[in-house]
Amino acid sequence: MEARKGSRDMTVSTIGGATLTEELEARGITRRAFLAFCTSLTATLALPSVFSERIAHALENSEKPTIIWLEFQDCAGNTESFLRAHNPGVADLILDVISVDYHEVIMAAAGHQAEAAKEEAIARGGHIVIVEGSVPTAGGGVYCTIAGKTALQHLEEAAVGAAAIINVGTCSSFGGIPAASPNPTGARGVPAVISGVPILNLPGCPMNVDNLVGTIAHFVTFGALPATDSEGRPLFAYGQRIHDNCERRARFDAGQFALEWGDEGHRKGWCLYKLGCKGPSTFHNCPTQRWNMGTSWPIGAGHGCVGCSEPDFWDTMTPFYARLPKPPGFNVTTTAEQIGLGIVGATAVGFGVHGVAKVIQHSREKTEASEQSDPAEDAGEESED
Amino acid sequence: MTIQPKPASVKIEKTPPRMTVKVWELPVRITHWVIFLAVVVLSVTGFYIARPFIIVGSDPGFLMGWMRAIHNLAAWVFIAAIAARVIWSLVGNRWSRWDQFLPVSRDRRTGGGETLKYYLFMRRDPAPEIGHNPLAGLAYLAVYLMFGVQIVTGFALLGLENPGGIFYNLTGWVFDIGSIPTTRLIHHMIMWLTWGFVVHHVYSAVLVDTEARNGLISSIVTGRKEVEESLLDE
Amino acid sequence: MPRIAVDPVTRIEGHLRVEAEVDGGVVTDAWSSCTMWRGIETILKGRDPRDAWYFTQRICGVCTTVHALASVRAVENALGIVPPLNAQLLRNLIALSQYVQDHVVHFYHLHALDWVDITSALEADPEATAALASSISDYPRSSPSHFEAVKQRLTSFVEAGRLGPFAQGYWGHPAYALPPEANLMAVSHYLDALDFQRDYMRIHAILGGKNPHLQTYLVGGMAVPIDPNSQNAINATTLLQLRKLLESGLRFVTQAYIPDVLAVAPFYTDWAAIGAGLGNYMSFGDFPTGAQNPSMDRDALYLPSGVIVGNDLSQVHRLDATKITEYVAHSWYSYEGGDGSPLAPFDGETTPDYTGPEPPYEFLDTDGKYSWLKSPRYDDMPMEVGPLARMLVAYGSGHERVQQLVNSVLETLGVGPEALFSTLGRTAARAIESQVLAERSLEVLDQLTANISGGDITIHNGDLWDPESWPQTASGFGMHEAPRGSLSHWVTIADGAIDHYQIVVPSTWNAGPRDGNGARGAYESALLNTPIADPERPLEILRTVHSFDPCMACAAH
Ligand code: HEM
Ligand code: HEM
Ligand code: NFV
Ligand code: SF4
Ligand code: SF4
Ligand code: F3S
Ligand SMILES: [Mg+2]
């Protein structure tokens, strides 16, 4: 089968493997159910509903894209999030929509057979590389090796002939927790260590699987990655702040804030701004897409956003329960306001002292002057200070 | 105001003749006090945004909304005043010119020494100056630059509400240098630095006014100072 | 002596490498190496102790609740904070449902493919499969037409020529012993389990905003509010939703998980004599019945704590946390005072010192340092922790429900208690434990409901929330019995910031390398004498290693 490089065109591709239609018919999945799936995908992609027909057409006629899922310095939170896919479920995804040819957590093969499966998939080309976890660069990369090879070696090999790299989670996108100060392993996000392949970031800790499914559907349908912002994040999921779509925004504007955990405001779902919510500094679609089949999301369940989809959030959004980051060089308990008051206070005290010193300087000059006029008379009076 | 006669035995100094000079033109004075008022409003509303210090009960009003609206309004007034002052530094009289802030000429650069000696008690009277002494000029330059940063960070924070909008496109690069929270921290800290400056600024005004007795404080209102004639011919 | 290396060991969490010497068709020696490290303990220094749980939670997204819970317990222990009863009960509910989801996903999606040959399922007769299924349980999706549809789906998937994650498996390996019908039933339940675990984890979204990585823990309690008269808090509707979800968990465990284990085990009775390993078992015990901090008061726990040495079930020793130390003799770390002797966690050091081969490499130097895991020891003895240890400690301590279920399983399989000390026993213990804890979760929900209807809706003790109220220095430890075993966090706080943080993890106990005395870890010991039919396809090594449910992100943190 002719290896396909780069993004494929939109036309029907039935070369070689069975298309999705044949597989679906063989399985007796009705076209109506399939269209329902496409409609919900269109919503996730924040596309006008007319697109659902176009997505259905594309998905039906494209050969399943090959997925190579690489884990490096990760916690597998994104793999678990992937298992929470609901529309379609992960079984439908793996069996019908995509071909996951390598994923350490779920693949049957182990050892050199697993590596062989990966190398074969790479050789075919046109695959999508999904990366979870950061890439260590210190010490020659010895902080993460698989089959005796470093994470960077695996990434570079998999990138050859890849149609795209999708970074799932904040670690592979921006370095995440391993890169948090002092970053003992020289951890980096994928974009910082590789180029030459279209790269898309799906940060979040972990990423929301609905956004991964949406990205894959977009790629299959339009043959390219969705438009991204300056951080490489797709606009359909990261185009707006949490704060601007939050169900508690009216409370913020009214000035109604939860003050303590479990107080009246907290129980009534008031704004969590004063408990450290970082919604105003974070771009993610949690308020609209929500999590686990739309069941809830962090602010909805009563805890502030911590900005997990932003670069370096472990160092810029902490301490999580303070409104502003810890000014560098100060103990973690000192707040910006304390430092501010300190500046104004110190200035006032400093110049207060200066003023007093000025008064002392003048009074001394006056006494010296009067001494010079009648030296004999008050010689004894003046005591040297 | 009778002049206190100097004791006879002190090295005899003839009290030099003084005359009233129109130092601060109207635009300088107006922009000064508009900036001051804007800063007050921006600080009160800004501090509320930073830490809502008014506890609203259960009757939902729009307090934070108003605070942010007023903050943005005051911000535009603030920007206008600063812009006007910058323009005036190109067209105004010699004491309002930009070179009174940025010490380009040699004596502006060395002149500051006298004022410094005054502040360090190595000199009895403030160095005689009509407009800003070089140190004050530098200080004001720093304040205006700091206000520039405050404007940029302010627009950046404003732009977050509409990514791809005019403000976001103009100032979004700010977030790539630091991050959104660090931008908010800088914007926050500049408020405190501003008020630190004001404390020093008012103190210096009072100090120099009482010592030089040139009507300095009133000058930022009336524009006029009483200065020694000799200074004028320089 | 031919030496083999399995790297990566797949169907686990994280990066594990196993090397083994094989002679005469059995494993004569084995080495377990974790090949990834991030340094979370190092990253925590200088941070706000109230943020610690969010950082440590990211040690692992599989056991996504355990490091958060252990951390808040450690900080609460250090600062002397006792969370309200509701918070304790909410923490129990989250931990119990984590166990059920974790164990179900492990059995079906990680371990099962060691025992189930999916290609043989293609030859299964749907009628016979339905007969088998209904003979072992009343699980609903067991009709011939259902199994026909599953077989059809599998067939068309295989015929499409793209085997995806099932490519290059050891299909047809002589060690597979299940008939086609059992394989097809297992494949059907594999697919059902994927939907079950997704729906079941809505419990964590209701209580914690999302799963994985619930965002609801607080030093001093929980962030999810309770208020029967508010739509933005836990009320009667949410309690009803939780009950339905918890019941669905118990149903899946009793109708699918345990019957499948009982159906598979008889074909693999030889594995009741393989993979025993150390014979030392430790459990911290958990699920406090009251509001006390389990690190301090180890008595009022639903699952008891204790230590068993040398397979002697008759004597459960009382746990003493001060006997926990960690060696780095064969670990890629160096201690200031030398690598010879171990350090207790409060004085622990995590200074990386890689002395292994430069990548790319083919084999490790297993005489020297060969893993990113330390070697935890209890009273200088290696310990196995996890489901088998918990069930043995509970069984030995006279836990009624555990004894009932263990005895009924042994009876069904027709084996004695010695069968527990094996890979098969470990696998059965995980299933039994899931039922015990699924049942317990409904009792905890009743306790929570009763407490709320009694008028108590507090979820957080905020007395010491403000760092100004903290002592200048404080230290404490937090213990939690996590799905893979005994977890402990050890924190020292100075001037309101974390001064020192050490973590001793279940998979470190199990997967750790040799210690300073040269004693093997639990994996290394359990792999000895494992039969190897084909060194090129070491399926048997995977079976025993998988029986521990390895998690390397946890173990190395
Ligand atoms: C000396 C002048 C100013 C002072 C003292 C000031 C003060 C403040 C303070 C203290 C905050 C709260 C920061 C935080 O803790 O989050 C704030 C927020 C803000 N300021 Fe200013 N500010 C000034 C000028 C400006 C200007 C020129 C703009 C331009 C548009 C601006 C726009 C904003 C915006 C958009 C916010 C954030 C509001 C939000 O997060 O919802 N500020 N300001
Ligand atoms: C936010 C508050 C303030 C700011 C930013 C500020 C800034 C400035 C600046 C930039 C100048 C130089 C004038 C120019 O050439 O543009 C100035 C002059 C002056 N300001 Fe302010 N000012 C503030 C508040 C005050 C206050 C409260 C007083 C009350 C005493 C005051 C008294 C004066 C005086 C007396 C001068 C003239 C100094 C001289 O003649 O050298 N200022 N101020
Ligand atoms: N080992 C381990 Fe964990 C568990 N259970 C934690 O402590 O898996 Ni990620
Ligand atoms: S982004 Fe978060 S969930 Fe994902 S690997 Fe990193 S720590 Fe784990
Ligand atoms: S809860 Fe957070 S995101 Fe929502 S309105 Fe309040 S501050 Fe903004
Ligand atoms: S913490 Fe992360 S999950 Fe969403 S609400 Fe904030 S971006
Ligand atoms: Mg540790």
Image: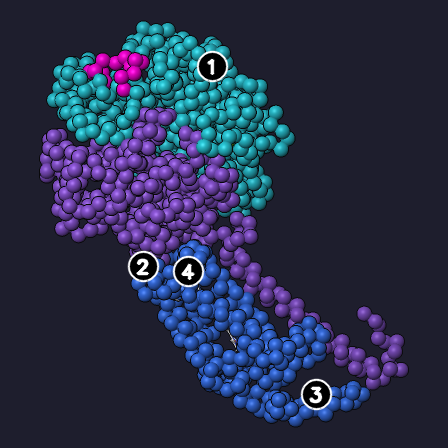
What is the secondary structure assignment of the residue under circle 1? loop
Could you tell me if the residues under marks 2 and 4 are in contact, i.e. CB atoms within 8 Å?
A: no
Give the CA distance from mark 3 to mark 2: 66 Å
Secondary structure at badge 4 equals: helix
- The label nearer to you, 3 versus 1, is 1
- Given the image, on which type of amino acid does mark 3 rest? Gln
Q: Residue furthest front?
A: A2
Q: Do the residues labelled 3 and 2 touch (CB within 8 Å)?
A: no
Image depth: mark 3 or mark 2 in front: 2
User: Which structural element holds mark 2?
Assistant: loop
Mark carried by residue B174: 4
Q: Where is residue C319 in the image (x, y as percent from the top left)?
A: 51, 21
Chain that appears purple: A
Q: Residue under mark 1: which chain is it in?
A: C
Q: Specify the amino acid type for callout 2.
A: Pro
Q: How far apart are marks 1 and 2 (CA)?
A: 65 Å
- Discs 2 and 4 share one subunit: yes
Q: Nearer the viewer, mark 1 or mark 2?
A: 1
- Which residue is labeled 3 in the image? B4
* Residues at discs 1 and 2 both on one chain: no
Q: Chain C is drawn in which colour?
A: cyan
Q: Is residue C173 magenta?
A: yes
Q: Which of marks 3 and 2 is nearer the N terminus?
A: 3
- Identified at 46% across, 66% down, the residue is B149
Mark 2 is surrounded, within 10 Å at the Cα level, by few (under 14), some (14 to 19) or many (20 or more) other residues, namely some
Q: Which of marks 2 and 4 is nearer the N terminus?
A: 2
Residue C261 position (above or below residue A229) = above
Tell me which label, 3 or 4, sits earlier in the chain: 3
